[in-house]
Amino acid sequence: AQSVTQLDSHVSVSEGTPVLLRCNYSSSYSPSLFWYVQHPNKGLQLLLKYTSAATLVKGINGFEAEFKKSETSFHLTKPSAHMSDAAEYFCVVSDRVDSNYQLIWGAGTKLIIKP
Amino acid sequence: GAVVSQHPSWVICKSGTSVKIECRSLDFQATTMFWYRQFPKQSLMLMATSNEGSKATYEQGVEKDKFLINHASLTLSTLTVTSAHPEDSSFYICSARAPRQGRSYEQYFGPGTRLTVT
């Protein structure tokens, strides 16, 4: 069965330093992968998605992620953290179940930005 | 991009009453909508998948009679929490699936509804 593992429940970085949020997945076929962000008391927002085109995907707010099939990873990065990046981040894989597509969610990583 | 709205954004109700939450896709038709529940500091848990004009498919462990889902049109799905109890207090999120583009469908999420049962 498909699954998503976010390796860190919390990540704390200083403002202006790089961000790395790790995600590994298991999938029996070529998956579509997503990163969503959820700010406190706000709805989910799609940061970026991979759908078998370029393996390096650029998203909004300076985030990007690289699909590495050999490592079954889809880590999210940003060169320089901003205070507004503090939020919960979810790695998601699209899974086909009974000819329907469902999203399989990681447990989430809380990103904390220190001034 | 596609927009999904939810109403209300938060609701407080008394134990034993029922609450209806609406989910609308504002600028696209969604043949499939999903209802999620999110507990504090946890990931989203899929409750059910609803296809327009047919009965919803509930995930294992979700009570059909307690969480009534109606997807009467291509832009509206409703979740009714019947005879609510304090343990039903949670953050409920809906999403609507946009028409397929290439290999993938994309889901757009509503802002969520915070339900508090007293």
Image: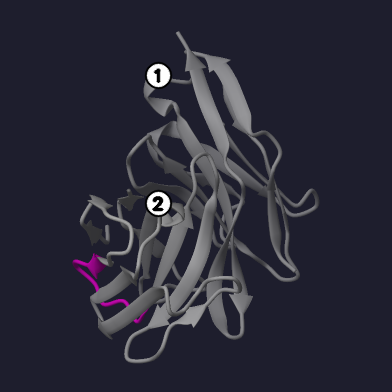
- Tag 2: residue type? Ser
Residue A20: quarter of image: top right
Chain of the residue under label 1: A
Where in the figure is residue A1, as x and y percent of width and height? 75, 69
- Foreground residue among B56 and A1: B56
Q: Going by the image, does B35 lie left or right of A70?
A: left
**Residues at marks 1 and 2, common chain?**
no
Disc 2 element: loop
- Binning the other alpha carbons within 10 Å of mark 2 as few (below 14), some (14 to 19) or many (20 upward) gives some
Residue bounds of the magenta highlight? B20-32
Above or below residue A13? Residue B42 is: below
Residue marked by disc 1: A83
| Residue B24 drawn in magenta | yes
Where in the figure is residue B36, as x and y percent of width and height? 45, 61
Where in the figure is residue B99, as x and y percent of width and height? 36, 76
**Res. B17 mark:** none
User: Which residue is the extreme one toward the top?
Assistant: A115
Residue B109: quarter of image: bottom left
Residue marked by disc 2: B89
